[in-house]
Amino acid sequence: MKESRAMDVRTEQQYNPYRVFTRAQWARLRDDMPMTLGADEIAELRSTHDRLDLREVEEIYLPLSRLLSIYVAAMQRLYVAQRQFLGIEDRKMPYIIGVAGSVAVGKSTTARVLQALLARWSPRPKVDLVTTDGFLFSNAVLEREGLMQKKGFPESYDLPKLLAFLSDIKAGRRPVRAPVYSHLTYDIIPNEWVEVDRPDILIVEGVNVLQTGKLPRDGKAVPVVSDFFDFSVYIDADEPVLRNWYIKRFLALRDTAFHDPRSYFHRYAPLSDEEATATALAIWERTNLANLEDNILPTRPRATLILRKGADHVVESVALRRL
């Protein structure tokens, strides 16, 4: 049995499609990438109960910014060469980065930090950020279809609308509109849109952006969201750690946002610590854990880069897919 396990480990290491870096090894890859964010700006980019400080930006996100600058430049050269080969007039082609991972893992913080860093490259590129929350079906539709308990699962998104949005972005159409989601009301805001007007770089953040579709028996194309990505980041952590972060965030929101009468979760504001913890745990196990195990975690091997976090929210290791 021990010999079999050892063989499995050797096989996994031999065929691992990723190069894995310790935090210290990754930090050294920053090279001369300049720090362009101040401490106050970093604090504003941090989500509730996430951890982000100057050191995290210097050791994790600046090397990633440097890597992305290399990837973007290489893709631009390839794009120009292909257009010349095809004899097509040049047109702006945005570089799209996907950010995936579980609820409460810190996707929003990572996406905002990347947007801030990339927007300060020279010359200043136009960097937009869109979350897939805006492409969820409205609560009315989810209620009608019996999907409220599966909000955030792949089937709870208006996939044709999301794919059409990404297709228009990639084709250089302008402007393209994305629906707006309210975390306060826990629903789509009717008749409200954010316009994305031909960015140089677009960051798309969401739990299931790396989700695949079923393979067609007839060989016809079945587009998925990640087909439009040029680079993708998966933020990873152990399930018990994620569960703890989710409960802590729930308790913090109970003491803040939930007190707003407009909040979808206003009914949870009067709960005691014990009651709120039990409620958060029930929601985690019923919805978020099921989504993680069935839909989100299986997409991790599809990411270009994996940021592995420890219990203190600090990135401990980085895995970069080999070319």
Image (cartoon, rainbow, N blue to C red):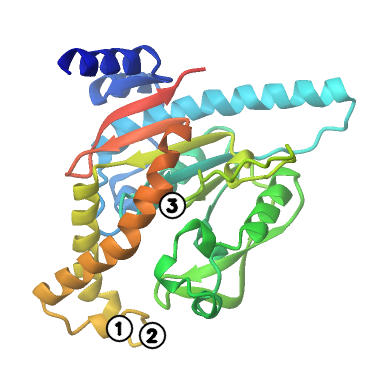
- Distance from disc 1 to disc 3, alpha carbons, whole Å, reads 24 Å
Q: Nearer the viewer, mark 1 or mark 3?
A: 3
Q: Amino acid at mark 3?
A: Val
Circles 1 and 3: CB atoms closer than 8 Å: no
- The residue at which mark 2 appears reads as 262
Circles 1 and 2: CB atoms closer than 8 Å: yes
Q: Amino acid at mark 1?
A: His
Instruction: Tell me where residue 162 appears, x and y as whole percent.
Output: 63, 56
Question: Is 177 on the left-hand or right-hand side of 153?
Answer: right
Q: Nearer the viewer, mark 2 or mark 3?
A: 3
Instruction: Tell me where residue 103 appears, x and y as whole percent.
Output: 34, 55
- Distance from disc 1 to disc 2, alpha carbons, whole Å, reads 7 Å
SS assignment at label 3: loop
Which residue lies at the image location 30% right of the left edge and 83% below the top edge?
Answer: 266
In the picture, the quarter occupied by the N terminus is top left
Q: Quadrant of residue 264?
A: bottom left
Which residue lies at the image location 31% right of the left edge and 49% below the top edge?
Answer: 105
SS assignment at label 2: loop
- The residue at which mark 3 appears reads as 207
Q: Quadrant of residue 2?
A: top left
